Image (spheres, rainbow, N blue to C red):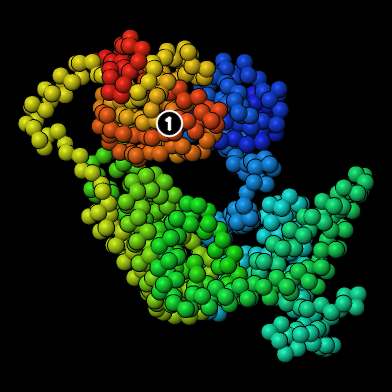
Amino acid sequence: MKYEQLAKDILANVGGKENVSSVVHCVTRLRFKLKDEKKANTEVLKNMDGVVTVMKSGGQYQVVIGNHVPDVYAAVLTVGNLGAISENTDSSSDEKLSMGAKFIDMISGVFHPILGVLAATGMIKGFAALILALGWVEATSGTYQLLNLAGDGLFNFLPIFLGYTAMKKFGGSPFIGMAIAAALVHPTLATLTTGEVSQVLFKGTLFESPIHITFLGIPVIMMSYASSVIPIILASFVASKVEKGFKKIIPAVVKAFVVPFLTIVIMVPLTFLAIGPISTWAGSLLGAATVWIYELSPVVAGLVLGGFWQVFVIFGLHWGLVPIAFNNLATMGNDPVLATTVMVCFAQIGAVLAIILKTRDKALKSLSVSAFISGIFGVTEPAIYGVTLPLKKPFIMSCIGGAVSGGIIGATAGKLWMFGGMGIFVFPAFIKPGSALDMSFYGSIIALVAGFAVAFVLTYLFGGIKQEKSLKSTTDATTASKEVAATKAQLEEVVSPLNGEVKALSEIEDAAFSSGALGHGVAIEPSEGKLLAPVSGTVSALFPTNHAIGITTDSGADILIHIGMDTVQLEGKYFKAHIAQGEYVKKGQLLIEFDIEHIKKEGKPVTTPIVVTNHKEFGLELMKQKHVKAGDSLFKLDTK
């Protein structure tokens, strides 16, 4: 928490965390959406140590930080507990989402808050199953029984947890959702199915239901809702609407208890009478349908799901399979669908290991090592977003490895018997509680080895990883030392990355650049949408929207190029990167293409600053030409 105090001061002076609707960041600045900008102390923020300046643009309140903005952003989220709203959007933007996007967003919002504890309890249950299968304990021993209770308790009462998260997602009171769910898993429900059968509904069909009790004369179809998913989510959705309706008409003086009373007294019977049975039948049909499709060819299903799983993750589409897996666990006791995807993380780190062994780029190697370690435990985002996806080919190779692992799990009839951990902690989830180790378990190990090996070999041989030759391998060591010394004693030339008109930074409307706070240099009004490398060096930063890039030269100068003003708001439209972060580029190499005409139509200037952010470490000599072509000398750095 190096930036903890700075984060606290920023939050205090934007009007407090209560005034923040959302906050994101780009290359250099925090971008707040404030409920009331008048509450912000702009002048105080501008004069604060650690803050470059403050700007207001595009409905955003922008606090310019500089190169270390990701660290400050993380501190702001932590000290302000803003994680839940960091990516919030207003209702108007929500309305523009497609139905599919809304569904994914809903599923993510319901399941994501409890995934950590679900994985933890699943690991406990898996460990209990493992020591039982290995004969280390007896099924009747207190050790096994307590471990099994610790692992199974959450899943058995899963509706209560989902009642909280679903109501919160739908905008209702979470504890009302929990109260409805608690009724669904109440222990006395079991006794209500032992009495006399008064009638049988839907006799002779798949939905045949014996009736033991009635509610106000209406037959109640009794079912087990332990571990269920769909009933409580649907009930919470309806309950959130009912609650909001009552809030509008109930007097404020009694609203605190009358609204929950009316909502619960209506929703519990409604859930038992209609929502529960219908959603349970729907869930059973959904589970049967997915298994039917899977069993048409488990190998093909595994190849497809394993091969495309990482693509699903990138676009958030994997959330669509999560409720199916939970539903299968609840209705059938196991799930073969997600089972085909859980070894994909090892294919990903197989590709990363190949990069570690082959690359000589120190920055890429260091990033890959940390990504490899996290990937062992199933956390592959650092590997995907930081290493393989930017390099493109290694990501494709990891997908091929993932397909192999998924196909093997399909071929060996692998099934998940619980929602377990990730990475190396997932293996016990392939053990059926109370049973010995079988091919489902051994198949998962084979899938790990095969997926890892395929991705590793393909990446190493065909991943396009460049092995930069070291200076000493091509010249005599003494000569090399002399050449390095001579290079450092000379001025390092920074050439124009663009065709266009040169402008002084002071002419830019953006105060962060015009004041020189982000660095010294010049700006160019480009006439062509091609950005070339102004120096040779390592791409130290490439923002995901491809509108800004940082290059560290061999002498240690940090060059920042920012295409246009506020172009981060275009979210990557009209920008195409031809390089990746961590890649070594040569002077004059094509970096980014951008569409000047469309960017201007969006109301964004394309004036592009080229600045040296650590200019205090170097002397800077600007050239005086007014018009330049890409490759013309722009300024020189004294690297002595």
Element on which disc 1 rests: strand
Residue at 37 percent across and 72 percent down: it is 408
Q: Position of residue 382 (x, y in %)?
A: 41, 47
Q: Which amino acid is tagged 1? A: Ala
> Taking the image as drawn, is residue 323 in sight?
yes
**Image position of 278 (left or right of 319):** right
Pick whichever, 543 or 437, lies toward us.
Answer: 543
Residue at 33 percent across and 9 percent down: it is 624
> Taking the image as drawn, is residue 142 in sight?
no
**Image position of 463 (left or right of 180):** left
Q: Position of residue 58 (x, y in %)?
A: 60, 28
Mark 1 burial class by Cα count in 10 Å: few <14, some 14-19, many 20+: many
Snapshot quadrant of residue 592: top left
Residue at 69 percent across and 56 percent down: it is 166
Find the residue positioned furthest to the top: 624
Name the residue that disc number 1 marks.
Answer: 548
Residue at 32 percent across and 66 percent down: it is 449
Is residue 626 placed above or below 37 in the rendered structure? above
Is residue 426 placed above or below 414 in the rendered structure? above
**Image position of 91 (left or right of 308):** right
Pick whichever, 409 or 495, lies toward us.
Answer: 495
Q: Position of residue 546 (x, y in %)?
A: 43, 36
Q: Position of residue 186 (x, y in %)?
A: 75, 70
Q: How many numbered marks have been drawn onto this rendered protein structure?
A: 1
Is residue 447 placed above or below 33 in the rendered structure? below
Pick whichever, 620 or 254, lies toward us.
Answer: 620
Snapshot quadrant of residue 640: top left
Is residue 348 placed above or below 95 in the rendered structure? below
